[in-house]
Amino acid sequence: MTTKAPWSDGRLCYGGDWNPEQWPPQVWREDVALMRAAGINLVTVGVFAWSRLEPEPGRHTLDWLDRVLDLLHAAGIRAALSTPTASPPPWFSLRHPDALPVTADGVRLTHGSRDTYCAAAPAYRDAARSIAGVLAARYAHHPALALWHVHNEYGTTCHCPHAEAAFRRWLTGRYGDLDALNDAWVTSFWSQHYTDWAQVGAPRATQYLANPGQLLDFRRFWSDTLLSAYTEQRDLLRAANPAVPVTTNYVLGDWVPVDHARWAREVDLIAIDHYPSTADLGAEEQTAFAADLARGWARHGAGRPAPWLLAESAPNQIHTAGRMHTKEPGRMTRHSLAHVARGSAGVMFFQWRAPAGGAERFHSAVVSHAGADTRVFREAAALGAALGRLAGTAPGRVEAGVAIAYDAASGWALRHPGMPRAGLDHPGEAAAAHRALWHAGVTADVVPPGAPLDGARLLVLPALYLASDATIDWVRRHVDAGGHLLVTWLSGVADEHARIRLGGYPGAYRDLLGVRVEEFHPLADDEEVPLTGGGTGRIWSETVHLAGAETVSVYAGGAPAGRPAITRHRVGDAYAWYVSTRPDDDTYRRLLTEAARLAGVTPTCPDAPPGVEAVRRHDTDGSLLHLLNHTDRPQRVPVAGFELLTGATVDGVLTVAPGGVAVVREEPS
Ligand code: GAL
């Protein structure tokens, strides 16, 4: 028997995390009936159920899961069955204290939350493989099984002796000998020269600044360690039934020691969890960025386009530091359909039913503590119906003329405390460029360095600090092929080991950009420098010398007063821009709009009113225009075609309801 993933039969996935282990069987039946009423077709089960599946070492209690999967199957709902390895049971930690994680400060953590294990500890890896193997043997051919969901949000780190020994093995593989490692880490500085592998440790707490190369490699090593914990489970799940796709859900955040781009080739679909961290319009900006990031990993990761899926999102509240904010009616739907517009194979929530206790008892759920007679449940059911009307439309190809480079390692390297300024943030700069384009109505791809730039006329490098020779070559090939380039401050300053590329910044791209940067002048958090032509620069400023480029705007104050702030260099018929500060949002939007325009890239829907997000996707039937009205007023958008959510024909102008969404199958022009 082969299983078909929901996205392969044209339906969009719709569902979320379901935790029947927290409830008696009568609630399971009620849940399944409610799921059917809400149009749910896929649920993630078993994520944190290890102690219910293996209450004692080697004793497995699977009957309840048999019943759960049978119940789902009878209801026509498929399962993304999880391996529960993100939360080892208490007996495991007591039995294997050496598998508890150690912080950089040398503190060994104790059981009591989740994710409390060291992914390099042999006992943990054995136990994880064992429980995954038990599930594979029992369920690999269960008719409800649509997808294996390995673990949950790989991302915890460890500095214990197991991790340290594995780090040395990884370094031996990477460098071969100590000379190469000493060279890469510039250990001639501060007397760090190593003469024996035994001297090389994990970057634990130390007296003052740690070695940047060591920190960066430890992050890379840990990403690979977590990846191997994933792939060994994947392999045994796949072996049990090769027809069932396998994935793990990515957690996004600058603390995550995972290079998700490198993981992309190891999963059958990219699955991301997305929770905006702000309740203002920033939530919509973050949603668009996360979706484009996921699409970039899916499209470029494996050298073959893979599907991607929003695997978790909040049915109601946005959690910001300090409090939870209610999503206004319609906002959950807009966030969900923004992901679908940008290519997601569906919408999944965390969580289906709110738990009666436990650490996340107040996290939002489709079925809340108040039950299902709620605004949130009704909106979820309406979304289920809407997704049903979009069946057959996903994912297609999202139209984007700009590509923004995104590189986990550059983000890690910029966080080293010895940088010229605290708070340097490559992911934040990538998001800022994306936000500027989002406000300009221009759709962007977000891609790992080295990815094919099919269709992108403008490539943006946002504080892309690290530049390997391969990355430089990738950028150069884009420009040689007539592509435009926009490079921001701190890009290409260092090589892949975080060693500075000498001779004037940005060493990697000086020639392409026709500039040479002599000095940095980092700004204070509340400091701005005026730019000629209006606008201000923030965070950073520099002394820039022209070496072939022309000046676009000049610092009208601050340390580099009178010197170029933004330049552009004619390369063939294209421009290579250099932006030596972070322009304020409005200036950045205008600058990127102009750079895109000169590259031949225009907004997706030039006449859409401000506050209406427009994304166009092409599939085999033509093009689909998604319109998301983030304002509280009706908005009129010029478009002709057939609106899929209402079934209405659109003659030339569509009015999108306040806070509403429309998906128009466009008339061929
Ligand atoms: C996710 C996690 C879920 C839940 C959720 C709360 O990151 O996978 O288990 O904790 O956050 O927002």
Image (spheres, helix red, strand yellow):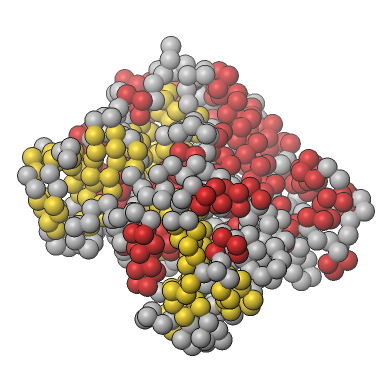
Q: Position of residue 289 (x, y in %)?
A: 40, 54
Q: Is residue 250 visible?
A: no
Q: Residue at x 63, y 55 (%)?
A: 467
Q: Is residue 526 left or right of residue 99?
A: left
Quadrant for residue 501, please give it: bottom right
Percent of width and height locating residue 293:
45, 48
Q: Residue at x 12, y 44 (%)?
A: 640
Q: Nearer the viewer, residue 26 or 37?
A: 37
In this orientation, which residue lies closer to the viewer: 86 or 512? 512
Which residue is at the far right?
A: 195
Name the side, left or right, on which 58 lies relative to 602.
Answer: right
**Image location of residue 343, percent across then percent down:** 35, 41
Residue 623 appears in view: yes
Identify which residue is drawn at 55% across, 52% down: 475
| 361, 441: nearer the viewer | 441
Identified at 22% across, 56% down, the residue is: 606
Quadrant position of residue 542:
bottom right
Locate the N terminus by quadrant. top left
Q: Is residue 418 above or below residue 84?
A: below
From the viewer's perspective, is 248 left or right of 370? right
Q: Is residue 119 above or below residue 602?
A: above
Mark count = 0
Going by the picture, which residue comes out furthest to the top?
1
Q: Which quadrant of the figure contains the C terminus?
A: top left
- Residue 76 lies, in percent from the top left, at 30, 23
Question: 24 above or below 293?
Answer: above
